[in-house]
Image (cartoon, helix red, strand yellow):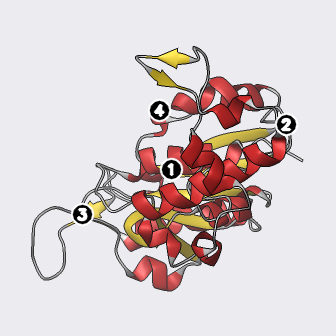
Amino acid sequence: MTWAATVLTLYPEMFPGPLGLSLAGRAMAQEIWSLDTVQIRDFATDRHRSVDDTPAGGGAGMVMRADILAAAVDCVLERRPGAPILAMTPRGRPLDQALVRDLAAGSGVSILCGRFEGIDERLFEGRPILPVSIGDYVLSGGEVAALTLLDACVRLLPGVMGAASSGDDESFEQGLLEYPHYTRPLIWEGRRIPEVLRSGDHAKIAAWRASRAAEDTRLRRPDLIARHGDARRPPPSGARHEEESD
């Protein structure tokens, strides 16, 4: 069954964008997944096709109207009642690999792209929409965030990556950052590839990678340690020895 994505946006011309290339583009051509867009302005009720208004209580910018967005969301819900609806907003829950895997395991997703100062909060009270954020920063709109979310989901769909296990060791899959990678040449600017990676001993290589993943996570993303107890455990047998001897 094709994994289907619907994007509600003021700028449908931004899609598929980079998702029409590389892995995602090939998967779309193979009908592993599909993408369609909904122009939010089509649900406006005035001749100017307005979708926003001044913020209640005063302040800068404009706010996307709940009534206009609800009409667009209701249309999508009627067409695809089983697909969860997400709204890309910096006020949302952080996007993580666990959520990506849940979404990729389903039949698809509908994504509402915010713009201006934000979305009338009553929309989230009146419709089953999950607000999601891709990071602690502000973008011009939710379209780039939607592209990010879709790329993360599509690459996990069966048949998109070359091998079923291709993503198993990547950053965040086990709650840690991924181990570092190396390739030829053996020596570059006086820096050698760690000898353990050239040993052919798969157990030692696995131990070294696990150790480096835990150590790099402690140094670069200590916030992940609190969510992943395994990172506090001693490295697998032989890992520390191999690392110190490189």
Q: Secondary structure at mark 4?
A: helix
Q: Residue at x 82, y 28 (%)?
A: 30
Q: Residue at x 55, y 79 (%)?
A: 127
Answer yes or no: do the residues labelled 2 and 4 have beta carbons within 8 Å?
A: no
Dot 1 or dot 3: first in sequence order is 3
4 vs 1, front mark: 1
Residue placed under numbered mark 1 in the picture: 146
**Image vertical order of residue 93 relative to residue 169, above or below:** below
Q: Is residue 114 visible to us here?
A: yes
* Image quarter of residue 82: bottom right
Residue placed under numbered mark 2 in the picture: 163
Q: Secondary structure at mark 3?
A: loop
Residue placed under numbered mark 3 in the picture: 117
Q: Residue furthest right?
A: 1
**Image vertical order of residue 22 relative to residue 34, above or below:** above
Dot 2 or dot 3: first in sequence order is 3
* Inter-mark Cα distance, 2 to 4: 32 Å
Amino acid type for the residue under numbered disc 1:
Ala
Amino acid type for the residue under numbered disc 2:
Ala
Q: Which mark is residue 13?
A: 4
Amino acid type for the residue under numbered disc 3:
Glu
Q: Residues within 10 Å of mark 1 (few under 14, many from 20)?
A: many
Dot 2 or dot 4: first in sequence order is 4
Q: Nearer the viewer, residue 195 or 125?
A: 195
